[in-house]
Each structure stands twice: as C-alpha cells, then as structure tokens.
C-alpha cells in the first residue's frame, strides 16, 4: 500500500499527503483564449506546478469540447466518483472557469462537496486555494464566469436569429432530400439520391394516404431510413432502435414521426424554417414552438414540391387528426393490452356500411403484420364480456364468499412461495457479485498506483466494472422492493369478496368501476391454417391474481 494511502479526508490534507487530480476543460468558446487555453497546455502547466510542490498526480481528467455550463461532463463525473471513493484529496485547475461556469453548481462543489469529502481545491491562475482563508473572491468569480457564458449565449443566439431572418440554413445536417452547398454551408442543394424518396412520400400523401401507409410502403420497397443515409455519409454515427434490434433489415424501418416531420416541413417548398424550439439559458430546449411562430423565409433553394400541393398535404394531415365523436377518452383506455407485443390496443371506427368501434393492436397499426397481428376485438363484444364477468364474479361471491376467499388466499400463498424463493436466490447471487466487484475496484486502483497497469487500462476496466455494478445495484434495489411487496399477502381476499359483491346487479360500465375492479385486459390472437381467427381475452382483476379467460371466435 502506498505511503499515505491509509489517510482519508482532511487527515490526509493536514498531514500533507496529497493525491492530486488535474482537471482540464476546453469548449469552443474558449478558443478565443488562444493556444494557452488548449488541453495540452493546461495539463503541462498543472503537472509542472504539482511537481514543484512535491504532490503526486494520481489522475488527469479532461473534457474537450464541453461548455462550463454543462455539469454532466464525462471526466468531471469520473473525477467526482473517484473523490467519493477517497482516491483523491486535491483537485487543481488552471482557473475557476475550467471547473465550471454555472455559479450555483460550481459553488456547491467548492463550498460543500469538496469539503465534505476532505478535498483541497486550487484554481491556480485565480489564486484560489480552499486550504487558505483568502477565498472570498471565489463566489464572485463564479458569477462572473456565468455572466460571461450568458453573454456568449446571447451573442450566439443573436447570430442564429440574424441568419434565420436572412433565410440561411444553420442546421448541422441538411434535411433529408437535400445536401449542403460545398460553396456555402448555409445554402441547400437538391440531393439527387434521396430527393426522389421525398417526392414519392409527398405523392402518396397527396393521394390521401397517411404516415402509417407511407411507412409500410417504404418498408416493403426496402427504402433505407434517413438515419442510415446520414451514417453512411459520415454525418452521424447513430443507429435507430430498429437497426439495433435487426441490423440487417432495421434500416428499412421508418418511424411515423419522421414521415410526419417531412410532410410538415416547409423546407421542401424551397423555404427555410428556423427558430422552431424554445430555448432558455442554462436549461436548453424547453419545448417546440407552434409552426405559426417559426421564422420562415421563402424561395431560398430549389423546391421538391410546389406550395399548393404542400398546402393540400397539410389539410389532409389535419383532417386525419380528428378526435373521437363525443370528445371523450375510450372507456377501456389504459387497461387493454396486446398479449403478443404488450402494446396498447387503440380504438377506431370502421368505415363499413354499418360502422362500429373496434380495438386493434397499436404495433400492428403502426408497423403492419410483419411486426404483430391485429388482435381485433369489437367494442360492444368487449363491453358485454367484461360486464357479464363482473356480474358473474359478484354473484359467486354472494353465494359462498368464505369459500372463494379461502381459495384465493391459498392460491396466492402457493404462488408467492415459489416466487419468493427464486427471487431470494437471485438477489443473493447479485449481492455477492457486487461485493466481488467492489474488491476488484480497490485492487485495480492499487495496481495502477504501483505501476502494474497503465492508467488507460485502469480506466477501461474501471468503466466496465462500474457499469456492471450500477446494473446489479439497480436490479437488487428493484428485487428487494418486489420481495417486500410479495412478503405481504398478494391480496386481502375478504376485502375483494366484499368489494365485488356490490356489483352483482350492475347494468352498465363506467371508468370509475373499471379502474377499481380491473387491473388489465389482455387480448390474445391465434389464426388457424384455414385463416379462422380465435381471440381469447384475459380479465385480470385488481385484487385477484388469477386471470379470467374468455374465448371469442373470429
């Protein structure tokens, strides 16, 4: 064990044994400071200073390209974690603004977090040292640093506002169907590879088809989504959730919202629409502005669709966003689920000769039969099935309530015993692994200090270990909560019997009754080889763990 390692907190500081961490930060705004502001120069300056003082530098943390207002910087968070593990008792930065420009959060670090963990903090160029009594200027420095950032933010926003009013494009990536002009990054040119896709999307919309129809056609024709195009061209190295799930075919999955955004974006008429988001200093984006509040400048580049056709598409989109006729929420909203994909079943009205309301799987509606089946059930059928089941259970409870209560209690206890034992075994295994990982972290640190492993390898293994620790701790916390819940009887059988008896003569359903009695309604679908649909519906009561299953033949 290294000399002084047994000291922690202020004991180590008073004894003069320092384990120093150098912290460097550079953002785009700091480029104004010249070469002296670079990460390398900050590091060299601080390492030289520590060497002269005889302090051991155990780690160098650096966040390149992060604003001082952002306190969620990766290496800053790593440094704070190391402080919590008592691996560091001295933090040194070039100046106070390197630590942060948010005066409240930076002040909390200096006035609370560092002292509470026995850490001395030095801002070298500002003459701030928390071990001395001359730090009254630090809060004012924090405020000035934040005022500087606020001033920069205003100037940047004013610059973007001016460009918006001039109709200049200021986005990082050109809208799908366009590319940035190599001669002028604020001007758009038609992208001959992707523009035909956009034109086809608008053509379908003009024919009266909605985003879901368009999404299915694009998938059938195996047209890659915009994320794939941007990644292939090196603009953004991200993948959609569908690509992560299915690397081979996920590229052809388009989100409903992406198609809707394309259909609503006036950029395709040759206009530039800017200032679409509400932004607040330190908070960032707080919401989307309404289209009428955007700054729109017409005739800035070649259009992909004429203005008249675009207006027709907007009207068609609005006509598809109609509320239910009575303006009320569906009676079974939040209760009815698909037994295959777990998503909600949504209600709609058929346009047949005799219109009726039906529930169907949300996944099927959004992504088609390749991702889930319809799970269709008529509203009236579901309504009468649930009403009859409630009356049936209520009458059974009135006939022999004690027998039913006893049966339910026995069933709950039997089910719980097996679940508890399995959960306890799993929790014990996870907790043992957490202890092993904690010992591994300590050994890793000792190996790095002793020079047996490099700092890079230490950081790599530490990140991997901490990630596993976090996942295990979250799983254990949830498991303990679940175990505590299941240690109690899953239901008060007598209470359930008393409650259900009230509904023996119920004649109609309402939302209050359903939410009191029903936990969820799960719809399953099976299709025979002769294409006959079979629907089974599970009704799970709030106080009853045994599902009631009804069969409906389609």
Image: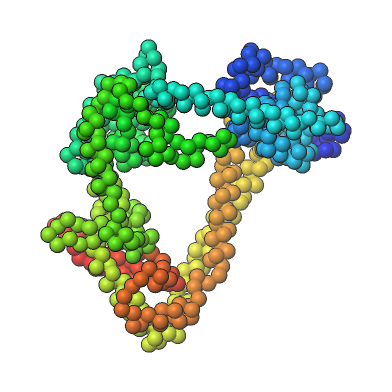
- Quarter of the picture holding the C terminus: bottom left
Residue 60 falls left or right of residue 514: right
Q: Nearer the viewer, residue 195 or 551?
A: 195
Q: Is residue 95 visible?
A: yes
**Image quarter for residue 397?**
bottom left
- Residue drawn 28% across the image and 36% down it: 263
Tell me where residue 190 appears, x and y as whole percent.
Answer: 28, 21
Q: In the figure, 334 relative to 213: above or below? A: below
**Image quarter for residue 264?**
top left
Q: Nearer the viewer, residue 422 or 456?
A: 456
Residue 420 falls left or right of residue 537: right
**Image quarter for residue 477?**
bottom right
Farthest residue to the right: give it: 15
- Quarter of the picture holding the N terminus: top right
- Residue drawn 40% across the image and 82% down it: 501
Tell me where residue 179 appears, x and y as whole percent.
Answer: 34, 21
Q: Nearer the viewer, residue 111 or 275?
A: 275
């Amino acid at each position: 064990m290294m000399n002084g390692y047994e000291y922690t907190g202020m004991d180590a500081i008073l004894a003069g044994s320092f384990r120093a961490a150098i912290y460097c930060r550079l953002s785009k705004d700091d480029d104004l400071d010249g070469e002296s502001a670079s990460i390398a120069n900050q590091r060299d300056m601080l390492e030289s200073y520590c060497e002269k003082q005889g302090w051991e530098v155990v780690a160098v943390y650096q966040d390149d390209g992060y604003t001082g207002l952002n306190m969620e910087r990766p290496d800053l968070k790593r440094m704070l974690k190391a402080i919590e593990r008592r691996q560091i008792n001295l933090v040194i930065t070039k100046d106070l603004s390197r630590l942060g420009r948010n005066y409240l959060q930076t002040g909390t670090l200096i006035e609370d977090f560092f002292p509470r963990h026995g850490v001395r903090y030095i801002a070298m160029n500002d003459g701030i040292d928390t071990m001395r009594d001359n730090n009254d200027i630090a809060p004012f420095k924090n405020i000035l640093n934040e005022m500087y950032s606020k001033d920069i933010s205003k100037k940047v926003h004013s610059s973007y506002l001016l460009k918006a009013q001039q109709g200049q494009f200021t986005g990082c990536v050109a809208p799908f169907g366009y590319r940035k002009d190599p001669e002028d990054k604020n001007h758009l040119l038609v992208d001959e590879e992707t523009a035909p896709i956009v034109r086809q999307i608008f053509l379908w919309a003009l024919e009266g088809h909605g985003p879901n129809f368009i999404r299915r056609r694009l998938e059938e024709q195996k047209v890659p989504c915009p994320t794939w195009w941007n990644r292939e061209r090196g603009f953004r190295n991200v993948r959609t959730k569908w690509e992560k799930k299915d690397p081979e075919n996920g590229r052809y999955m388009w989100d409903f919202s992406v198609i809707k955004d394309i259909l609503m974006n006036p950029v395709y008429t040759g206009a530039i629409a800017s200032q679409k988001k509400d932004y607040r200093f330190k908070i960032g984006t707080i919401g989307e502005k309404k289209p009428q509040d955007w700054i729109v400048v017409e005739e800035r580049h070649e259009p992909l669709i004429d203005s008249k056709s675009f207006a027709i598409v907007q009207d068609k989109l609005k006509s598809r966003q109609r509320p239910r006729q009575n303006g009320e929420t569906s009676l079974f909203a939040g209760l009815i689920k698909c037994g295959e994909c777990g998503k909600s079943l949504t209600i709609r009205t058929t346009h047949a000769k005799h219109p009726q309301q039906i529930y169907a799987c949300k996944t099927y509606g959004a992504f088609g039969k390749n991702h889930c089946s319809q799970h269709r059930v008529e509203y009236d059928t579901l309504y009468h099935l649930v009403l009859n089941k409630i009356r049936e259970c209520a009458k059974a409870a009135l006939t022999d309530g004690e027998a039913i209560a006893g049966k339910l209690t026995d069933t709950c206890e039997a089910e719980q015993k097996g679940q508890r034992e399995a959960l306890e075994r799993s929790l014990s295994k996870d907790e043992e692994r957490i202890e092993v990982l904690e010992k591994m972290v300590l050994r890793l640190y000792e190996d790095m200090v002793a020079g047996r492993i490099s700092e890079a390898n230490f950081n790599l293994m530490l990140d991997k270990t901490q990630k596993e620790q976090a996942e295990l701790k979250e799983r254990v916390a949830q498991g303990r909560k679940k175990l505590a819940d299941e240690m109690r009887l899953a239901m008060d059988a007598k209470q359930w019997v008393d409650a259900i008896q009230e509904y023996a003569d119920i004649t109609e359903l309402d939302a209050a009754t359903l939410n009191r009695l029903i936990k969820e309604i799960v719809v399953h679908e099976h299709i025979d080889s002769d294409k006959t649909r079979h629907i089974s519906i599970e009704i799970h009561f709030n106080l009853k763990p045994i599902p009631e299953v009804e069969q409906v033949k389609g």
